[in-house]
Image (cartoon, rainbow, N blue to C red):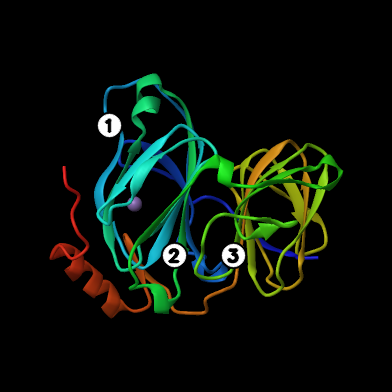
Amino acid sequence: MKKLRFIKPSNGAHWVGDGFPVRNIFSYDDIAHEISPFLLLDYAGPREFPPTQKKLGVGEHPHRGFETVSIIYSGEVSHRDSSGGGGTIGPGEVQWMTAASGLVHEEFHGPNYAKTGGPFEMVQLWVNLPASQKMREPRYQAITAGQIPEAPLPEGAGRVRVIAGSFDGAKGPADTFTPMQVWDVRLEAGKTTRLTLTPGHTATFLVLTGEVRVLGPNGGMEQVREAELAVFETEGSTLQIEASTASKILILSGEPLNEPIVGYGPFVMNTEQEIRQAFRDYQSGRMGRLKD
Ligand code: MN
């Protein structure tokens, strides 16, 4: 059985542009080295937006050295990048963007959603790339809801949507550079779930909705509440979760990269020198520009 190491509360709320009211759950400034290859997670919403003619979101900005993974629960996000990637995704859909050597992009509420307004909820996860892949060509994977397999948990305990990795024979559509599991999991109230993860891989989950209990470091059960992240030992393979209420959680597990993490703003590399180079390359236009 995997033991809980600690529960991390969010770092507080802030706006990303004028479209994304996020709670930063973790970043490369705090515990990323303990849950490699995951670097940062912003949890946007849930929040109700009124109908608007305005384009809410965040304009052109760069990234280098990792991947951004946007998972939409409610609402709609439109994205466009300088390597030619882009599109609009809605509930149940995922955009998996490999920034790698660098690009600029913009992220806004989708036009149809903006017109009607309504509930908005999404996660943006940053996934690190191994040093050998940080300067490869950018890539964009648009993953539709229909491409994400859903597998039931035993004893009616809930269901798992497999975005990356595999669960019970269901293989997630995301093509990743290192082995990892990214699972959108729904748990039924009062049920206990046992999930098998790879020993030696990092293991963590975020509670988006509801409340769950896990085995704590001292042998007692500990509550994990909304917008909290439970971080587990890499040893062991069984992750046991009791749902106190109906819950929506995001499980992340992966092979640790064991490489230095040096991040500054939108760039995450292995050395300070590479960060300085990223700023120079962005300023000289080598990450491209969006055309109007
Ligand atoms: Mn971005």
- Residue extending farthest right: 155
User: How many residues crowd mark 3 within 10 Å: few (<14), some (14–19), many (20+)?
Assistant: many
- Determine which residue is flagged by label 1: 55
Give left or right: position of 192 versus 255: right
Amino acid under label 3? Met
Label at residue 180 = 3
Q: Depth check: give the residue in front, 161 or 261.
A: 161
Q: Earlier in the sequence, mark 1 or mark 3?
A: 1
- Residue extending farthest left: 284
User: How many residues crowd mark 1 within 10 Å: few (<14), some (14–19), many (20+)?
Assistant: some
Q: Nearer the viewer, mark 3 or mark 2?
A: 3
Counting from the top left corner in percent of width and height, residue 124 is at: 46, 49
Q: Disc 1 beta carbon < 8 A from ligand 1? A: no
Counting from the top left corner in percent of width and height, residue 168 is at: 75, 56
Q: Depth check: give the residue in front, 187 or 265.
A: 187
Counting from the top left corner in percent of width and height, residue 236 is at: 76, 71
Amino acid under label 2? Tyr
Label at residue 28 = 2
Q: Quadrant of residue 17?
A: top left
Amino acid under label 1? Lys
